[in-house]
């Protein structure tokens, strides 16, 4: 079965960038829809974006457009989330998760996110 | 964007209690709703998808219902391991928003 293993905790200064990885096993990355969700300390879950199987493109929440880049390396089955211009409000646990659903290019319906990475803590502090 | 609200935001209950959590959407979305359980320091776990379908391996005391804009998650008899925070998520359209969460605590 699919497993997602994320990279370790990061401590960054304001204005820096961070790149979090999500290693896929038990399946090939090219057949999955990987999404990123973050959770600030004591707060709820926030969807950041992910691979849209409907059109084969990455879609971002408006809040993260221009500051977050999600990429995939299919040769190593690893997904990445890079965030730039970090600020203290970006301190959070970042999760990758599989978007599970059915359909194909043009039409895709999600069931939910059924497999999650263990989370990566990113701390932004001067 | 579809906004989700949950009620209550916090509830205190005893083992064996029947618990119901509501999730309301700002616009109709058929049955494209999922429920998750999250325990401290852990990743969320998918409990229910398509509003009412139990994910494999999830105990049958969990159930979901609703469609359109009104949804509920019910735990028929609360067990010690069910004390956690529960989130709904709409998967009807982007952005795939989450509700603010309901924390279920021990009375």
Image: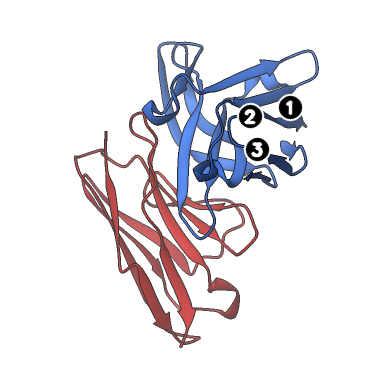
Chain colours: A blue, B red
Q: CA distance from mark 2 to mark 1?
A: 33 Å
For label 3, the crowd category at 10 Å Cα-Cα, with few meaning under 14, some 14 to 19 and many 20 or more, is some
CB under 8 Å between discs 3 and 2: yes
| Pointer 2 or 1: first along the chain | 2
Q: What residue appears at the point 41 percent right and 82 percent down from the top-left corner?
A: B12
Residue A16: assigned label: 2
Q: Quadrant of residue A33?
A: top right
Q: Name the one closer to the observer, B106 or A126.
A: A126
The quarter in which the C terminus of chain A is drawn is top right
For label 3, the SS is loop
Q: Name the residue carrying label 3.
A: A13
For label 1, the SS is loop
Left or right side of A6 for B69: left
Residue under mark 2: which chain is it in? A
Left or right side of A33 for B77: left
Residue under mark 1: which chain is it in? A
The quarter in which the N terminus of chain A is drawn is top right
Q: CA distance from mark 3 to mark 2?
A: 6 Å
Q: Name the residue carrying label 1.
A: A27
């Amino acid at each position: 079965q699919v497993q997602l293993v994320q990279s370790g905790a990061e401590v960054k200064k304001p204005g820096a960038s961070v790149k979090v990885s999500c290693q896929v096993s038990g399946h090939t990355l090219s057949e999955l829809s990987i999404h990123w969700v973050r959770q600030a300390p004591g707060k709820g879950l926030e969807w950041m974006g992910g691979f849209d199987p409907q059109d084969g493109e990455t879609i971002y929440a408006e809040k993260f457009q221009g500051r977050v880049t999600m990429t995939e390396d299919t040769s190593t089955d690893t997904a990445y989330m890079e965030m730039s211009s970090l600020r203290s409000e970006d301190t959070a646990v970042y999760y990758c998760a599989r978007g599970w659903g059915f359909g194909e290019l043009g039409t895709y319906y999600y069931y939910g996110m059924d497999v999650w990475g263990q989370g990566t803590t990113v701390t932004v502090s001067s | 964007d579809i906004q989700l609200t949950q009620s209550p935001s916090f509830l205190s209950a005893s083992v064996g209690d029947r618990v119901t959590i509501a999730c309301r959407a700002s616009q109709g979305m058929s049955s494209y709703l999922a429920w998750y359980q999250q325990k401290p320091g852990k990743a969320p776990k998918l409990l229910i998808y398509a509003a009412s379908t139990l994910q494999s391996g999830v105990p049958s005391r969990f159930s979901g219902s609703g469609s359109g804009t009104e949804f509920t998650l019910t735990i028929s008899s609360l067990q010690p391991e069910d004390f956690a925070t529960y989130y709904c998520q709409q998967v009807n359209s982007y952005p795939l928003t989450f509700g603010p969460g309901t924390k279920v605590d021990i009375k």
